[in-house]
Structure formats: C-alpha cells, structure tokens
Amino acid sequence: ITSPINGVIVERNFDPGSLVSPGTERPIVVVADLSVVKLVVGVSELEAGRLRVGMPATLMVQARPGESFEGRVAAIAPEVDARNRHFAIEVRTTNPSGTLLSGMYGVATIPLARATDVLAVPRAAITTRDGARVVMKVSNNTIEVSPVTEGLSNGTLIQVTRGLSAGDVILADTGRELASGTTVNPIPVR
C-alpha cells in the first residue's frame, strides 16, 4: 500500500495478514504530514474582531519549555461557538525538524499592536476604585490613590499613558485594600 501523501504513520489499525471485512470503516493506517502543524485556539469576540488572516503569531508548547515557534493566523471561524462564546482560530507553523507532534498542548501569542519606550506596570498594580482605574502610589511613605489611563497590555504588564511618571513608587499588587493616607514602609522590587 502506498500513501498519496508524505508523512508518518500515526495510527495502524490492522496487522499484516489481518482480514478486513467489507463495510469496515476504520482505515488501515492513518498518515499525518507534520511538516506544517496547526494550533486551534478559542478567542473572545473582542479579540476575534481584531485578528486578521496572515497576522504573525508566536507559539509555545508545554512539551518544549523555553522554545518558541513562529507562525501565522491561517483561519478565523466565521461563527461563534454557542457553548463557550469563543471563535476558533487556526495558527499554522512550519515544523521542518519534526519537533512539534500532533496533539501537543500549546498557546499562541498574537501581537495586535506594538509600543516601545513606554511606562508599564504589573497587571496586579492597577485596580478599580469607584469606577476609575487607579494605582496605589507611595509618596513620603504614605499611600495615595492615583487615577491612571491604561494603554496596551501583553497580559503581564500594562502600559500607563497618564497618571504616573517614571520613577514613581507604586504598590506592585493592589490585592489588599489600603486606604489613601495609610503609612507604609516600601521595599523595592527589582
């Protein structure tokens, strides 16, 4: 038996000499071409509306920590999945060395915008108080609630376009409710 495509056998359902009865719906073998692999990901409506086919993406898989693979958005589902309210997108990457295997779990990062030389703070440093986005600024060892305007985010850091200056000391994690005027002893985090 000759396969019509190049690839590797990923499933063999019958051994040499086995009899296959008419009407058997299982294939003898399944051949996969792993020279290009795809990652199917669900994204929210907001994210799907900003994505375009051909956008660059960076893929990372759990089985290969510290490695990343460059790919592109290949398809965006035209309809939302009613079960989870996500749109399926497909990201493809070349796999010439066969490093990526079918079924590996991965994540894709698709940059929607880029900014350089910006002021950014940890995501946990910004919170909402009385309907406004704020940071807890430390001035003379006292907490001040300072409204900020957010810009771009990479999921870990958030750009601050207004409300902070370089060198301002802030609380890195606003998980604890501290009132304005609270005295603190700041410890620098590097």
Image: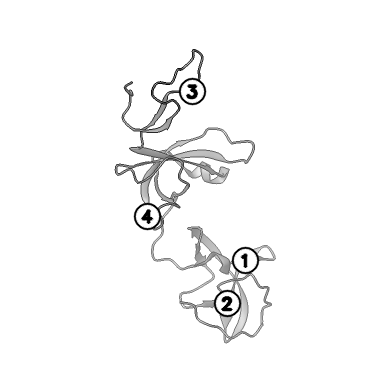
- Regarding mark 1 in the picture, which secondary structure is present there? strand
Image marks 1 and 2: residues in contact by CB distance under 8 Å:
no
* Residue in view at x 58 percent, y 41 percent: 86
**Foreground tag (2 vs 4):** 4
- Regarding mark 2 in the picture, which secondary structure is present there? strand
Number of marks in the rendered image:
4
Q: Amino acid at mark 1?
A: Thr
- Regarding mark 3 in the picture, which secondary structure is present there? loop
* Residue in view at x 62 percent, y 41 percent: 84
Image marks 3 and 1: residues in contact by CB distance under 8 Å:
no
Crowd band around label 1 with a 10 angstrom C-alpha radius: few (<14), some (14–19), many (20+): some
115 w.r.t. 140: above or below: above
Q: Amino acid at mark 3?
A: Arg
Residue position marked by numbered label 3 in the rendering: 26
What percent of the width, then of the height, locates residue 80? 58, 36
Q: CA distance from mark 3 to mark 1?
A: 55 Å
Closest to the observer, 109 or 144? 109
What percent of the width, then of the height, locates residue 89? 49, 39
**Of callouts 2 and 3, the N-terminal one:** 3
Q: Is residue 185 left or right of residue 19?
A: right
Residue position marked by numbered label 4 in the rendering: 67
Closest to the observer, 190 or 28? 28
**Of callouts 4 and 1, the N-terminal one:** 4
Q: Amino acid at mark 4?
A: Glu
**Foreground tag (2 vs 3):** 3
